Amino acid sequence: MKPLAANHRLVLVNRRGFGASPEVDGEDFDVDAGDLAEVLTEQPSHLVGHSYGGVVSLIAAAQVPDSVKSLTVFEPPAIWFGGGPPGGSSLHRRPPGHADCGPTAG
């Protein structure tokens, strides 16, 4: 990130409970997105999010679209966000011999 920081202002945000942020119980996309939206309103920015941060970035961008110059997300776990894959739940079934996980586990 050093080459990018040489010519641009970077704001690096850790997910709650990771990096230097204090530990928390659970996660809340909406709370995290609201906090990120506040940062974005200070100065319109290019927004990049990865994994959980990708979903948070999508929500924050929807909350303050005029504050987002561009949006890039890498591997957002959006298949579970919104109830599962489009077209039904066939992707929720696991092959025989594989452990169940995700929202359909049980």
Image: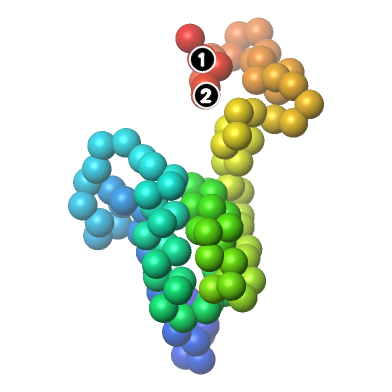
Instruction: Examine the image and state in which quarter residue 94 appears.
Output: top right
What residue did someone put label 1 on?
105
**Mark 1: secondary structure:** loop
Nearer to the camera, 35 or 5: 35
On the picture, is 39 further left or further right than 51?
Answer: left
Disc 2: which residue? 102
Res. 48 in view: no
What is the three-letter code of the residue carrying label 1? Ala
Q: Residue at x 43, y 47 (%)?
A: 30
Residue 18 drawn above or below residue 70: above
- Give, as a three-letter code, the residue at label 2: Gly
Residue 39 position in % (x across, y down): 40, 70
Residue shown at the point (59%, 14%) measured from the top left: 98
| 3 over 77 or under it: above or below | below
Report, in whole angstroms, how far the alpha carbon at label 1 lies from the one at label 2.
Answer: 6 Å
Color style of the picture: rainbow
Q: Residue furthest bottom?
A: 7
Crowd band around label 2 with a 10 angstrom C-alpha radius: few (<14), some (14–19), many (20+): few
Residue 39 has which mark? none
